[in-house]
Structures are given as C-alpha cells and as structure tokens.
Image (cartoon, coloured by chain):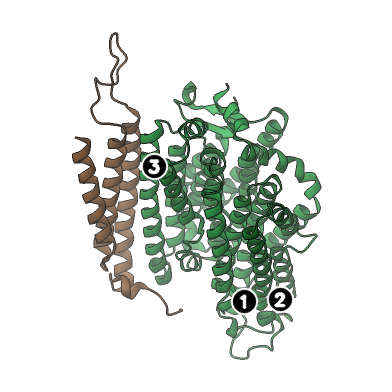
Chain colours: A brown, B green
Amino acid sequence: MEVLMSVVIGLLFTIGTYLLLTRTLLRIILGTSLLSHGAHLLLITMAGLKTGAPPILNEGVTEYVDPLPQALILTSIVISFGVTSFFLVLAYRAYKELGTDDMDRLRGNDHE
Amino acid sequence: MSNFIILPILIPILTGILLVFFRTKITLQKWLSVIALILNTLNAGYLIYIVNQKGIQTLEIGGWKPPFGIVFVADMFALLLVFTTNIIAIFCLWYAFKTIGKGRESYFFYPFFQFLIAGVSGSFLTGDIFNLFVFFEVMLISSYVLIVLGGRKIQLRESIKYVLVNIVSSILFVSSVAFLYGITGTLNIADLSVKVTQLGLNGPLLVVAFLFLIVFSLKAALFVYFWLPGSYSAPPAAIAAIFSALLTKVGIYAIIRTFSIIFYQEPQITHQFIAWIAALTMILGVIGAVAYNNVKQILAYNVITSVGFIVFGFAVFSKDALEGVIFYLIHDMNIKALLFLAGGALITIAGSSQLKDMGGFIKKHALLGWILFITALALAGIPPLSGFIGKLLILKGALAANSITFYWFTGIALLSSLLVLYSVTKIFMNAFWKEPNTNVESNGNIKGILAPCIVLLLFSVILGVGAEWLYPFVEKAAAPLMDPSIYIDAVLKE
C-alpha cells in the first residue's frame, strides 16, 4: 500500500511541477493545488498506513494507527484550501485589470 | 509555566477580529490597533523581565506534556524579537495613519496588520515545527492581502508572483515536515533535537535538513531572493517597511532555530554550506543595490545584503558571532523599517522613485535628507549607531574561526557594507545635493510623517550607545543557541 501511495505522490508532484512551469495562470494554480495534494498524501503516508486498530485507548490494544498525521493533514488542507481560493480570486482580478493571464507578459520589466 | 506567553499571539488576533466589525469606524480602528500593540509591547517587556529572572518559560497548551502536546517556548532570543517587532509595528502604524489612504483603511488594512503581527510573534514563540508552519501561514496570508490591498496594476502583477513563490515553499515545508515526522516520529523542536542526535545527522535526515534550509531560504530571501525586489516595491511604504523589517527576519529566525537546535550536529556540512550561500547573497545583493537607479530597488537589494550578512554571522557559529547576530537582527529590524519609511517619504516628495527625477531637495526637505544620511551611516555600521556593535561581534567571531574561507567571507562582508553605504549615499547625493531637476514639481506633502522616522532613528542611537546595557540580555539569548541542552531541558524538564 505504501509503495502504491508513493507512486501516486510522485505522479502528483510530477504533474504539479509540469503545470507550474506552463505560462497560463489558471494552469499554474491547478499545479499548486495538485502539488499540495501530493504533500498532504505524503504527510499521511509517512507515518505508515493502517498499522493496526483505531487510535482509541482500550484494554488489549497494542497496535494502533498514529492519529497525529491526520490532525496535521486536516490543518494543512484547510490552509491550502483558503490560499487556493484566495489565489483564484487574485488571478481573476489580475486578469480583469491587466488583460492577460500569460506569465510572459506579466514579467514587468517596464517601470511604471 | 506562564499564561502570559500566549498573549503576544492572542492580543493581535482578538483585536484583528474585533476590528473587522468596525469597518466604517476608522478612528476607532486606529485607536484599538495602537492600544493593542502597546499592550503587546508591555507584555513582551514583562516576559523579558520574567525570563531574565527565572530562565526559559514554556506554556503547554491544554496541559499536554511535551513532546505530545503543542508547546510555546519563551526564551530570551524569541522575546527580544517579539519586543522589537511590536515596537517597529507601532511606528509603521503611525506612519500608515498619515499615508495609507481612506480606501485601504476601510478595506481591512488594520485587521490584517494585526493578523500579520500575530503570525510573526507566533513564529518566534512556538516550540513545535508544525505549529511553526501554521504561524508562517497566518503571517503569509496576511501579507498576501496587505501586498495586494489597493489593487493597483503593479500590485496585482507582483503579488501573483509573491503568492506563487510562497505557496510552493509552503508545500515544500509540509513535505519536509512529513519526512521529518516519518524519520523521527516527533514534531516538538526540543524532542527533535534529542532524536536527531540519537539517529545521527546523516543520510535521509541530512536531506531533510537541506529541504528545511531551502524552505526557510525562500522565506528569508537567502540566495533565492529573486521574488523580493519586485514584491517589496509594489505596496505603499508603510507596508513595505513592515515587510522588510519582519518577514525576512522570520525566515532568518527559523534558519537559526532549526540549525542551532535541531540540525546542529554536522556544522562542517550544513553550516559551511550556509556560509557559502550567505556570502553569495551578500555579493549578489550588493551588486543589485549599487547597480539600480530606482530608490525602491536599491532599498530592496539592501534587505537582501543584510540577510546575507546576518546568516553569515550565524554560519560562523561561535559565541561572539551569535551574540552579534542577535544584536544585528534587532538593529536591522529597526533600521530597515526606518529606511523604507524615509524612502517612502522621499518618493512622496519626488512623485517618482527614479533617481534621475530627483534633485535639490536639501533646500526644502533638509530634515529628511539628514535622516536618510544618518540611516546610511547606521546601515554601514558607523559607531555610535546601532549597526556597529553587531557587525563588530560578527566579524570578530568570523576572524577567530581561523579558517581561510571565513577570512575571505569577512572580506566580502566588509566590502559589502562599504558598498551598502555607497548605495544609500547615492540616493542622498542624487536626491538632495544634485542641482534641482526643473522638470519635476516637488509637491508631495510629507507633513507629520517624519516623526516616526525620527523616533526610529533615536532608537538606533539608543541601541548603539546602550549596547552595554543590552548585552546581558543578548548573552542570555545566545546561550541556548550555542548549547541546545539549555533549551531542551527547559522544554522537556528532564
């Protein structure tokens, strides 16, 4: 299971990086979103998947799943959700104002 | 165990939330923000007093003992920075009252300013590496809003890049935390230090250490600084000042914390590498500062050079150098805020940030001219101003290290501070001494906005002259950095 997850994480990072390197702003945002999914999956995989019972203290339970990564991933998902929505609004507003979503034309070597 | 430790985070967050409800009542917002910051400063002062008496204080959230719960750790280093942060914030806010404009004020400038302070203070005080990520995000999200607030074209264009760079570095941060947790099974900074020492800093752990270095370098503008000049020249002066005073410093703080307490075991690999990129940052930053003829760009490259210098001091890693780093960090927060505020005033007068559009301001605006000139001297580290003592200690530490590379780097540091002086006096000479430029009407009004600059300048003098008085605090702050066991014992209470 861990191996499969690692492959998925690798794929997400690859596609995310590819999208990040394109010129269209919307694709770049999708890229960051895929990258953050990759990071979150990584976070939950690193602690080991399904190693035992649910993490509830009980008589006779010796093997249990580490609950901490789940708390971490939840926090991280909320943050990346907020940031992505902010970024989308920012990109829309920038497109309206600047009239382009092409990163090459957003370089800004011209001083205003 | 003191609940006061949470107040530097709680006060700004609660104030910020409160301010959101008073969107139209701007006078009330101004009063509340200033009162909150003053309370915060007093509290930080009180904490410094306590820590000075009793040693490092910790707060275990919810009573969960470390390493299981989240802890906040108030050591002298963090507290000195929290204290300075709040003082600088008061003066940037004062400057903002006069300059920021009605539009920004009624669209939540003051609440986000408070959230920014909460994020910065939280990053300084936390004792948990994932919590550090959360506070970084609090700080960054506020900074995203502040940088784009106003929605001018240049702001929108530059904030896209700023947001993108920071999102990518945050993703790297989460991934490095994941790897670190996978290897060590803990997130508490003190506990991490123990575990990393047991496992030995090699193989995967070393890779993780370098991942953290990349993440924090992106935030601190250490070597990977390409995003900084553009994004720091987009927002108005008050916001650029608080950014340059605080945000890069939080990155530097994170580098110092992680590489002095968690990953300190192999200095000949990690610290040597940090020294190299710090030296490169100094060189590249100062080239930018000398080459540009645009005030905003010159100031932004000055930030980069000082980041290089501070991190170089850290990489030397001796008692003298670390004390110098702490002195210099406090000085640099103060002087960078001052530099951007004074630069903002200059741009207001000239109506342009190009040096060629300026000239002859000495007749009408002599005071601003001399403020800028003295700031330049403080930046270069001329005694008795505040830059001197930090620079002296860092260079003393570097020369005592007795290695050829550090001799070279010391030379680079000295040369770069000379060129920094040149780059700022270039602004002074062009704007104030040159023949008046007849094409440009100097009609900007800077009445009342020089007062915060003068007070910050006074601080610089006080820091320089009163170094003797400040020294015991700095010595206490540097001790846990040299000897992590002080920090670990205070947190884990073994």
Could you confirm whether marks 3 and 2 are on the same chain? yes
Q: CA distance from mark 1 to mark 2?
A: 9 Å
Residue reaching furthest bottom?
B438
**Residues at discs 1 and 2 both on one chain:** yes
Q: Secondary structure at mark 1?
A: helix
Image depth: mark 3 or mark 2 in front: 3
Crowding at mark 1 (Cα within 10 Å: few <14, some 14-19, many 20+)? some
Residue lying at 58% horizontally and 54% vertically, measured from the top left = B311
Compared across the picture, whether A1 is left or right of B33 comes to left
Residue B462 x/y as whole percent: 78, 53
Report if the CB atoms under discs 1 and 2 are less than 8 Å apart: yes
Horizontal arrangement in the rendering, residue B228 relative to residue B493 (left or right): left
Q: Residues within 10 Å of mark 2 (few under 14, many from 20)?
A: some
- Determine the image quadrant of residue B157: bottom left
Number of the front mark, 1 or 3: 3
Location of the C terminus of chain B by quadrant is top right
Query: Which amino acid lies under the numbered mark 1 shown in the image of this protein?
Result: Ile
Q: Which residue is mark 3?
A: B204
Type of residue at label 3? Answer: Pro
In this orientation, which residue lies closer to the viewer: B278 or B102? B278
Label 1 to label 3, Cα distance in Å?
55 Å
User: Which residue bears the numbered disc 2?
Assistant: B365
Q: Could you say whether the residue bearing mark 3 is in a helix, strand or loop?
A: helix
Residue B107 appearing in the image: no
Labelled pair 3, 2 in contact (Cβ < 8 Å)? no
Relative to B450, residue B33 above or below: above
Q: Which mark is residue B349?
A: 1
- Give residue B422's quadrant in the image: bottom right
Check the residue under mark 3 and report the chain it is in.
B
Measured in 3D between alpha carbons, the distance from the residue under mark 3 to the one under mark 2, in whole angstroms, is 58 Å
